Amino acid sequence: ARKIIIDTDPGIDDAMAIFFAFQAPELEVLGLTTTFGNVSVELATQNAITLTEIAKVDVPVASGVVVPRVIAPLPHPDFVHGKDGFGNIDWPAPKGKAIDKSAAQFIVDTVREFPGEVTIVALGPLGNLAAALELDPDLAGLVDEVVLMGGTAIEYGNVSPVAEANIMNDPHAADLVFTAPWQVTMIGLDVTHQVLLDNSVLERIRTANPAEGEFLYQCSQYYIDFYSSRFDMDGCYFHDASTIAYVMDPSIFGVELGAVRVACEGIGIGQTIFAPQGMDFPSPNWVDVPMTQVCMEVDSDKLLKLFETTMS
Ligand code: BDR
Ligand code: CA
């Protein structure tokens, strides 16, 4: 099985992604690391532990960064994920505790234990990955791949015309991640806005898999209401869980190669700027930037099927 660490800010679609990964026989989840984002890091950590308890898996949870590196923290989007991060469903607090190690230290130690084998799947703002890179300057060369949900190359943003929420929450961290010498795959709004998850899928999963299915169904109602009241759609976008589908079966996606950098100030703050491979720009900002794989196409039916069958 492919070894992964999931860095996350649960978060309703984070919960979908985490259960998806727990259920996938192709994947071995080595740990969850948490960040501020959809909720505070304290709540993200509690929520991550709750998910391990619902799924009855014994996976360590390490708590991570509390605030962005440079910018002032943005408000948590409770109108999307609820005050509790799970759509205000009043789920009981978990019994377990986080391990006594920071998220960044957990990432470094785990990657060092399995050099070349670990994929980091990032579902929130990227502060823990940036902190891990600083903690261990050789880290990038030891990681198999970084697969992240965030950004957008061509599609409009979701928190500004050009910025996606995870990147906007900590643009400086994101720029470090995109310019470090590791293989990054970006799953941004270009593809996640092409996949719509609706209640019919969630209802079938609930019937087939009552433990995780009931929880996902309950917390998704708030999320689906948000999407259907704001936009004319009957369901929700499938952001974070798309990363897990990518790790399981990359052929579901079409990728383009290019350099990605993040605007860290001004009106375009949080934008992931994409320079397709082969276009050489003389500005020093664009010299020697590693190639990111940017997902631009997705087979939505295949992706949703993979989610449903794995979760059932
Ligand atoms: C991303 O932002 C969060 O609200 C979601 O959990 C997802 O990671 C989508 O822009
Ligand atoms: Ca998330």
Image: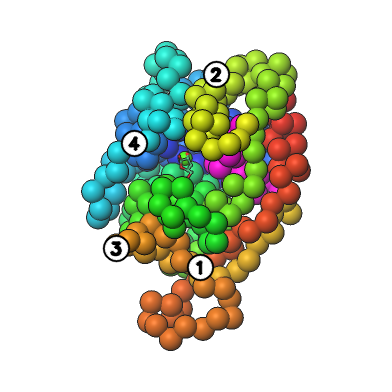
Residue 242 percent coordinates (x, y)? 61, 44
Circle 3: element type: loop
Quarter assignment of residue 303: top right
- The residue nearer to you, when weighing 271 against 31, is 271
Residue 83 visible in the current orientation: yes
Q: Earlier in the sequence, mark 1 or mark 4?
A: 4
Q: Is residue 105 left or right of residue 10?
A: left
Way the structure is coloured? rainbow
Structural distance between the alpha carbons of marks 2 and 3: 39 Å
Q: Residues within 10 Å of mark 3 (few under 14, many from 20)?
A: few
The answer for how far apart the CA atoms under marks 4 and 2 are is 21 Å
Q: Is residue 84 above or below residue 191?
A: above
Disc 1 marks a residue whose amino acid type is: Phe
- In the image, the segment drawn in magenta is 235-250
Marker disc for residue 266: 3
Which residue is label 1 attached to? 274
Q: Against 5, is 154 above or below?
A: below
Q: Earlier in the sequence, mark 4 or mark 3?
A: 4
